[in-house]
Amino acid sequence: MENRRHLCAHHARAPLYTRMVIHPSMQSVTMSTVVTAKLQEQFDAGLETRADFTIDQPLERYGQVDHAVWQQLYARQAALLRGRACDAFIGGLGKIRLPADRVPSFADVNRQLKPATGWEIVAVPGLVPDRVFFEHLAHRRFPVTWWMRRPDQLDYLQEPDCFHDLFGHVPLLIEPVFADYMQAYGRTALAVADDDAALARLARLYWYTVEFGLIRDPRGTNGLSIYGAGIVSSKGESLYSVESAAPNRLGFDLERVMRTKYRIDTFQKTYFVIDDFAQLFALADVDARALAERLAALPELSAGTVLDTDVVLQRGTGEGWPDDDDA
């Protein structure tokens, strides 16, 4: 079962998978991701999770290096995103009051977040299984990896850490329409959780919106602003997504996006641009089964494809694109 939260700090990404496994340190069957070094390290140390894969945030385990890495990443991205990230993200960052100098307390974040939109963040040891992730989203809980990357991983990480999950995702969860979209996504995914092909297409929607989405903004760079977490948490992609001539930038269309493959190992070949967050929330009105059946009859599209029917905001030059097949 492919994990839907493929995410790293930089443009070099690797796929991760989930399955049911039994850890020697546990007496019962536990949902886990297939062997990532960080997860294995935690399980070897005796980590036990709840049935929903959550843990209590181990605040006492953050050291000076962890706080220094958070401070460095926060300062870098906060400066880089001025004039590039959308107003909703910048505003949300202020509303949830993330500290600039230390790893945040999840409880402190929830004191700002939950009264605003009913969402809360929950600590997890790393990537979680699909169904667990969807259940959390459907109940307005966002899983946040508790641990921080090392200083030598500022620009390369093969799995999401606390900075990516918290800085990248959580500010928009205080924006009501986007918050509703995230819950609708979780519910839609649960409705087709027994259909691997449908989940693969929904993974594309998550990738091209929640992780790598752009939004129209007349005051933004080239009329665009960033909202996707994979962009706002990455130095390289923050610049590339709105300033490079290489990628396509196409108007968002739900079914078009769900037919489009993506790259997990390079910058994106194509970005889909929404008009506003309300355009995403249309997912809540979709019959998930009917949509899955309709899309199953249509051909899949490579990441760099531009169709005659697309709304083309910018046709990319393709410079630097890998020429092997997309995932």
Image (cartoon, rainbow, N blue to C red):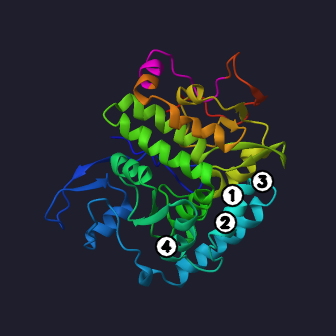
Identify the mark nearer the N-term, 3 or 4: 3
Instruction: Identify the residue under disc 3.
Output: 84
- The image shows residue 78, relative to residue 127, as above or below, that is below
Tag 1: residue type?
Phe
Secondary structure, magenta segment, majority class: loop
On the image, the x and y values in percent for residue 314 come to: 79, 31
Tag 3: residue type?
Arg
Residue drawn at x 46%, y 18% as measured from the top left = 294
Tag 4: residue type?
Phe
Is residue 267 highlighted in magenta?
no
Query: Which residues, given as a range, are shown in magenta?
Result: 292-305
- Cα gap from disc 2 to disc 4, whole angstroms: 14 Å
The foreground one among 61 and 35 is 61
- Cα gap from disc 3 to disc 1, whole angstroms: 10 Å
- The image shows residue 146, relative to residue 180, as above or below, that is below
Tell me the number on the disc at residue 316: none
Instruction: Identify the residue under disc 1.
Output: 89
Instruction: Identify the residue under disc 4.
Output: 106
- Cα gap from disc 1 to disc 4, whole angstroms: 18 Å
* Mark 2 Cα shell of 10 Å, populated few (<14), some (14-19), many (≥20): many
Identify the mark nearer the N-term, 2 or 4: 2
- Cα gap from disc 3 to disc 4, whole angstroms: 27 Å
Using the rendered image of the protein, determine whether residue 153 is visible from the camera's viewpoint. no
Tell me the number on the disc at residue 93: 2
Residue at the left extreme of this rendering: 27
